[in-house]
Amino acid sequence: MTMSGSRKVTVTASMVLLFCLAGSVLLLRRLDQVRTSATLEEVLYLNSPKLVKRLSLGYDGLLADIYWTRAVQYFGNRHVTRSAADYNLLAPLLEITTALDPKLTVAYEFGANFLGPKPPEGAGQPDKAIALLEGGIRNNPDDWKLYYDLGFFYYMNLKDYARAAEAFDRGTKVPKAHPFLRVLAARMAQHAGEIQTARMLWQATYATTKDDLIRQNATAHLRALQVDENITELEKMVAQYRQQTGVLPSNFSVLIGAGILRGVPLDPDGKPYKLLADGRIELRNPDDFPFVEKGLPPGYQAAGPAKSR
């Protein structure tokens, strides 16, 4: 009787285990159907984070990675091809990802950057981006970088100095928070100049990450800010010369001869800027500076994907 009962328990447990494993395999295969060439609506996915978590059978981390990969593919396909007018499934994908693995901080950081900008650069859903970052902070209250990301988002995407300052200040109270947060909170409270503030934010981004892609992005933004600052100053010099003489300078040598400019101005690549007959300043190779606001020829369209954060 004892052996018979034990055998029944073993058989029953084995059947339950096989059923669970089969369910996991089917769920994973279903998720694996989601390709960038497929329509997510056709194959997706259970859109309830709680249900997916229950069906994960302990594979929360694995499924979180799968959903995060799908979110990146979904966003990347639309961002690069600009073939879709909306990103309706982006927020649900990110919600499921972070519900499965609340500690997957990369999903909060990059997910907010996907959600926030206006189409076609992003989903144009800043409220959802903020909600995602706030959720990340709730789940990871001692990760100061999430407070930095929130403050960065408020400033860069919404130009909301007050809330940016508040987010940075909240971050200063986190153990081992980077000292930069206190400086940034003060800078936001003072409503400092746009270029100087943006430069400080990108410098902080570069200094506080080990991710090569993020560092490259920060470097590109810092180069663009240098161009914008250079051209702003050169425009002031051109205006000063015109005010003094009544005419526009024909070249930089004229400004140098007038004692307004010290030497031929160079961009961050060491190439001289162009001074046009109408007084405008342009870059010689604008494609080398993907985030500049100034120095672009009229009607200029960047080669390759659109600009983004």
Image (cartoon, rainbow, N blue to C red):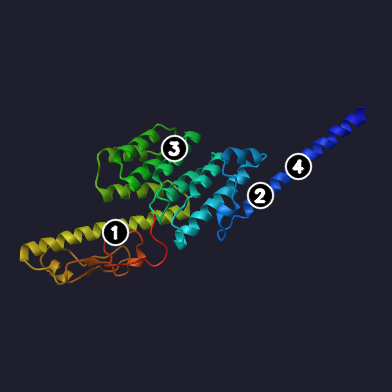
Chain-order first, disc 2 or disc 1: 2
Q: Give the residue at mark 4.
A: 19
For mark 3, give the secondary structure.
helix
For mark 2, give the secondary structure.
helix
Chain-order first, disc 3 or disc 2: 2
Q: Visible in this render: residue 275?
A: yes
Chain-order first, disc 1 or disc 3: 3
For mark 4, give the secondary structure.
helix
Q: Is residue 26 left or right of residue 205?
A: right
Q: CA distance from mark 2 to mark 4?
A: 14 Å
Chain-order first, disc 2 or disc 4: 4
Q: CA distance from mark 1 to mark 3?
A: 30 Å
Q: Nearer the viewer, residue 83 or 194?
A: 83
Contact (CB < 8 A) between labels 4 and 1?
no
Q: Give the residue at mark 1.
A: 293
Give residue 28's mark: 2
Q: CA distance from mark 3 to mark 4?
A: 38 Å
For mark 1, give the secondary structure.
loop
Marks 4 and 1: which is nearer the front? 4
Chain-order first, disc 3 or disc 4: 4
